[in-house]
Amino acid sequence: MITKRIIPCLDVKDGRVVKGVNFQGLNDVSSPVALGKYYSDCGADELVFYDITASAEGRALFTDILQEVAKQIFIPLTVGGGIQTLEDFQRVLQCGADKVSVNSGAIRNPQLIAEAAKKYGDQCVVLSVDVKRVDGRFTVFAKGGRENTGMDALDWIRRCVGMGAGEVVVNSIDTDGVKQGFDLEMLAAVCDVVSVPVIASGGAGSVADFIHLFQTLPQVDAGLAASIFHFGEVQIPDLKARLAQENILVRR
């Protein structure tokens, strides 16, 4: 059985980590450098950084922060937000990222995935998908969950993996920030159509939610969360100890 990964997610805006509920009402949390080092030191398996500042000034600021974080942590770092071109891939990889997450940029230009996979390897290319139920159908949303693309999420994910995405982060807008558990129905549907690693995102509210995720869907590779880690509601060492007690393999 493959070791399950626990991944804190840091949404960075104007140089600070923020976290909202259902992608609305973002709250200031902490310094990304301090938080990144804290998670690296306390046993997180990976770290995900999303730059949610769209401006050019924000992009430069984020590059500086990214370099500082990369110096402080000793776990794999995935970076996303505003990735539109191969040059964006190059920029964040040069700053110290191990993997690059694409979302709206791939929707605008699906060939970006194929080009990046060819140049950097599919292990570097992470497809991040914001998904919401619309009329009973899993639908892809763009621009941080604000824009309904009308695309079927399962078709889109299958297509992107076929082009070279080596991993898929499934962000359920329906459960994001609500802390009532991961979207197991959505995750099961995704796992049925791809064979690459699938990361569950959106809805974690307790240790029990991670246990339920991995016991119900052993094919899910990792659980990603933000606010429960940022606000100390769940400590990563405690979470891993509980998972191990339930015979769920984790790195400790």
Image (cartoon, grey):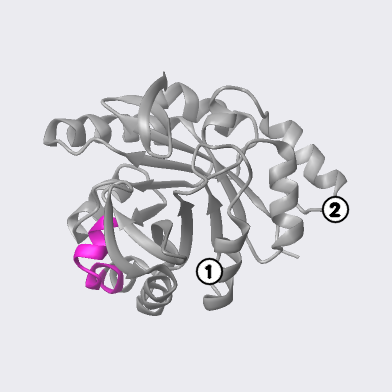
Q: Are marks 1 and 2 in contact (CB under 8 Å)?
A: no
Residue 206 painted magenta: no
Give the dominant element type of the magenta stretch: helix, strand or loop: helix
Q: Which residue has dot 1 on it?
A: 190
Q: Position of residue 39 (x, y in %)?
A: 56, 31
Task: Tell me which segment is drawn in magenta.
Answer: 103-115
Task: Bin the neighbour count of mark 2 within 10 Å (Cα to Cα): few under 14, some 14-19, many 20 and up.
Answer: few
The local secondary structure at tag 1 comes to: helix
Q: As displayed, is residue 10 above or below residue 119?
A: above
Query: Which image quarter holds the C terminus?
Result: top right
Q: Position of residue 139 (x, y in %)?
A: 38, 64
Nearer to us: label 1 or label 2 = 1
Q: As displayed, is residue 96 above or below residue 172?
A: above
Quadrant assignment, res 232: top right
Q: As displayed, is residue 92 above or below residue 192?
A: above
| Residue displayed at 12% across by 36% down | 56
Q: Position of residue 126 (x, y in %)?
A: 41, 60
Q: As displayed, is residue 230 above or below residue 213?
A: above
The local secondary structure at tag 2 comes to: loop
Q: Nearer the viewer, residue 212 or 54?
A: 212
| Residue displayed at 20% across by 67% down | 109
Whether residue 50 sits left or right of residue 63 in the image: it is: right
- The residues bearing labels 1 and 2 have C-alpha atoms spaced at a distance of 24 Å
Q: Amino acid at mark 2?
A: Asn
Quadrant assignment, res 43: top right
Q: Nearer the viewer, residue 22 or 225?
A: 22
Query: Which image quarter holds the N terminus?
Result: bottom right
Q: Which mark is residue 247?
A: 2
| Residue displayed at 43% across by 76% down | 158
